[in-house]
Image (cartoon, helix red, strand yellow):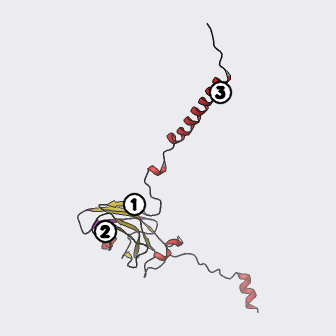
Amino acid sequence: MRFTAMNRAQRAKLALTAAALGIGLLASGCGYTNPQQTSEQYQSSDGIITDLGPLQLRNILIVSSGEDQPGRVIGAVYNSSSQDVTLKLNGAEGSQTEVPVKANSSTLLNDTTDAAVLSTTGGIPGSLVDIKISENGTNVNNTVKVPVLDATLPEYKEYLPAGSTPSPTTSATPSPSASESAGGAGH
């Protein structure tokens, strides 16, 4: 039996090939065990994502200070059809609001001067409420659970509907301490 000796160049090629193969397997192993987050749709905000025919609703939520208080619907509505569409939102106790959306356009409910306000939210802040969504009064309905948030987060404070009473919070004004009261009374 005869063995041929490898020369130095052949050993170097073999080592480089093994190293490249090892790195390739290591790199592809990460993608194999960890799925890409960008390939999955997820809700990246506090609101919900849902589609209804030509309408795509994104980051929809209700800002309200209480269950029996009015609630403003904020988020974005995209209309991919060639016709103007009216989105209708029906909430608790017969509360409803409508949002017109132009053809091949979008409406940002956060920016509109004609705010989409429900007369009552039907849920306390932190809960999910059922909202029945339809477009142009068709029989195509979709009931979704929409989160209710209050002004605890400062970015939502400006969206509290007019006429709603803010949630009770702790006072930001410090009360005078006993020593200050006693010291101030003698002066």
Residue situated in front as seen by the camera: 76 or 22: 22
| 2 or 1: mark nearer the eye | 2
Q: Residues within 10 Å of mark 2 (few under 14, many from 20)?
A: some
- The boundaries of the magenta stretch are 119-140
Disc 3 target residue: 12
Label 2 and label 3: CA atoms lie apart by 65 Å
Q: Earlier in the sequence, mark 1 or mark 3?
A: 3
Disc 2 target residue: 103
Element carrying mark 2: loop
| Amino acid residing under circle 2 | Ala
Disc 1 target residue: 49
Residue drawn where x is 23% and y is 66% of the image? 138
Query: Is 155 on the left or on the right of 100, as rendered?
Result: right
The C terminus lies in which quarter of the figure? bottom right
| Amino acid residing under circle 3 | Ala
Label 2 and label 1: CA atoms lie apart by 20 Å
Overall secondary structure of the magenta section: loop
Choose top left, top right, bottom left or bottom right for residue 111: bottom left
- Measuring from the top left, give residue 146's x and y in whole percent: 39, 64
Residue situated in front as seen by the camera: 182 or 152: 152
